[in-house]
Amino acid sequence: VEMMNQKADELGLKDTHFVTSTGLHDENHYSTCKDMTELLIYALDNENFRTIYTAENYTTSSTPTHPKGITYENTMFKKMDSKELNNGGIIEGGKTGYTSYAGLCLSSLAKVGEEEYILVTAQADGSPDTEQYNITDAFAVYNQIQ
């Protein structure tokens, strides 16, 4: 967490302070969609991060404890019927989140034509057990790009 806050400072994220690595609610753990966008822009320059962030499923390298590795399933892709946008674009990757305080959240990456776009949203209505308004909001925004 100390390293996370150091990186936030290095990146100039003035409205971000981390308390835990999980992102669960704490009054001293906060950020903004703008700061999370800046963090995502930085992270996407890392090839390993981009590979994992845009994968529907990702399996880690093997370890003595997990000889077959650990497989992660991207919950955003799992809750979408398709990655395709109405304008010919595609949602390339994303990370969902939820707390009762922040609501449904999403950081996402889409490509329309030759351009990539990032959208970070928070406080969408619902919960993990309802319609995923964070994802439907992303489709609505990305589909407006010409």
Image (cartoon, helix red, strand yellow):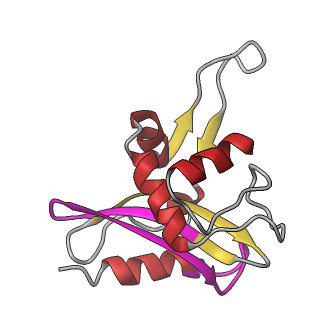
Residue drawn 58% across and 53% down? Answer: 8
Which residue does the image show at 53% across and 65% down from the upper left?
35
Q: Position of residue 40 (x, y in %)?
A: 47, 55
User: Residue visible at 21% across and 76% down?
Assistant: 87
Q: Is residue 8 magenta?
A: no
Q: Quadrant of residue 66?
A: top right
- Residue 128 at least partly seen: yes
Q: Is residue 121 left or right of residue 89?
A: right
Q: Position of residue 67 (x, y in %)?
A: 69, 16
Residue 54 in view (yes/no): no
Q: Residue furthest right?
A: 26
Image quarter in which the C terminus is found: bottom left
Of residues 79 and 100, the one nearer the viewer is 100
Left or right, residue 52 beside residue 27: left
Counting from the top left corner in percent of width and height, residue 116 is at 27, 61
Residue displayed at 78% across by 18% down: 65
Q: Main secondary structure of the magenta part?
A: strand
Q: Nearer the viewer, residue 32 or 73?
A: 32
Asked which quadrant contains residue 133, the reply is bottom right
Residue 93 vertical position relative to residue 50 in the rendered view, above or below: below
Question: Magenta stretch?
Answer: 106-133
Query: Is 140 drawn above or below residue 8 in the view shown?
Result: below
Q: Is residue 49 above or below residue 99?
A: above
Q: Position of residue 110 (x, y in %)?
A: 33, 63
In this view, 101 is above or below 4:
below
Rendered-image quadrant of the N terminus: top right
